[in-house]
Image (cartoon, rainbow, N blue to C red):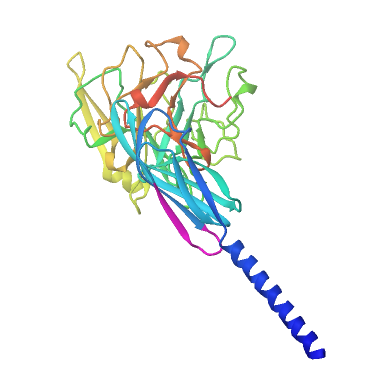
Amino acid sequence: MKNQSLLNWLYFGLMLFSLSSCMKDEFLESRSNVLIKVDNSKLVGEYTIENVTVQMQEINTQVITSSSLGTGKDTVKANLTYGTYTASLEGDITLKVNGNDKKMKIKARKSNLVVNSETTNISLETFLSDPSANFVFKEIFFTGTMTPEGKQYNGDKYFLIHNNSSDTLYADGLFFAQSDFLTITKRDYSPDIMKDAVTSDGIFMLPGTGKQYPIAPGGDFVIANNAINHKEANPNSIDLSNANFEIELIGTINIDNPQVPNAINISGNMLMHNQGYTAYVMGRLPEGMSPEKFKSDNAYTYSYVAANGRTMNFDSYKVPNNYIIDAVNLSVKTGFEWLVTAPTLDMGWSYAGLVKADKERYGKAVTRKPLGTLVDGKQFLQDTNNSTVDFNPATTPSIK
């Protein structure tokens, strides 16, 4: 009798173990029909997408399931075991910008996606990625403002710089230069170096040890003429007290904010022409090159013959094109005569004023157009090396 009871208990235990194992195996092998929707709503303009691959990686097992997105399609189907997944997408995109094709990468990523039902719907919001992207001028406020009494107010100008890449970049060591030559006055300068360099005697560089000032993907930073709240002196002006850097101006108009790092003047003082008659460039010196060596290596004496027949001579510096990562030519709408950079740097120009000495220009900027988004929804800005199509002219400054 005891043996029979023992056998019964053993049989019952084996049944429970078998049932438990089956239930466990059944759960592990449970699968879900997953529909992955590709969301391109943040892209701007006309584009074509191809060679898109979607990967679903289960976090615990590290198993990857790949699927290809058909041309012209926006959904992918996958049959996945229950689990927690990371979804990623990568493909090629060709955007039509001003009639020209711009090839880039398109990506998406989403983590901690729980798949535990018969059907699962997932949406992946795409973003743009350009391996060659760098810092760009996002906005230039060069016109200044007017006081309530109708007087011109100086010192409230600024550059807004944007990290147009999908990587963290560092502002340390960036230089900025304002062209000597004017876009409204074409002259035959000798020797002619314009195809190779920009002529400038107004150059400054940002401080830093190399990785002291990180800028996140899609992030911005402000370089102010004077990093103060200008509204205290002029209610029509703006508050630049939170700028990231400030330019050291000539003594009569320089107001130092000790809380904001000063840029390093390499040459002259960049006062920013308030009618927009110049070009601005940004770049980096070659590794190991000091400002002093830059000046000794790139000293440039040029001349031109004035209307009265007199030869005019000037000392300045040439900024080699291969040092430059972005350039913007500025002018007035009805006064433009020529570009003062090589067309490889900028094939166009933008403006704030309609005519020379236009009083309506005050309080206006030029602002780069968005083209889509980067990771985390930050803006990707249009950069075709043509300021005419890349910038909106005569805009309201984004800083208030």
Q: Does the rendering let one see residue 359?
A: yes
Q: Does the rendering let one see residue 170?
A: no
Place of residue 395 in the rendered image (x, y in percent of width and height, measured from the top left): 47, 19
- Above or below — where is 218 with respect to 85? above
The residue shown at (42%, 54%) is 66
The residue shown at (25%, 30%) is 343
Q: Nearer the viewer, residue 156 or 349?
A: 349
The reply, left or right, for residue 68 in relation to residue 119 is left
Place of residue 306 in the rendered image (x, y in percent of width and height, measured from the top left): 21, 17
Place of residue 231 in the rendered image (x, y in percent of width and height, measured from the top left): 62, 22
Quadrant of the drawing holding the C terminus: top right
- Above or below — where is 133 with respect to 100? below
- Above or below — where is 180 with respect to 175? above
379 magenta-colored: no
- Above or below — where is 65 with respect to 274? below
Q: Nearer the viewer, residue 302 or 326?
A: 326
The reply, left or right, for residue 372 in relation to residue 24 is left
The reply, left or right, for residue 107 in relation to residue 384 is right
Q: Nearer the viewer, residue 55 or 391?
A: 55
Quadrant of the drawing holding the N terminus: bottom right
Q: Nearer the viewer, residue 217 or 79?
A: 79
Total tally of numbered discs in the picture: 0
Which span of residues is magenta-colored?
Answer: 58-68
Place of residue 331 in the rendered image (x, y in percent of width and height, measured from the top left): 35, 19
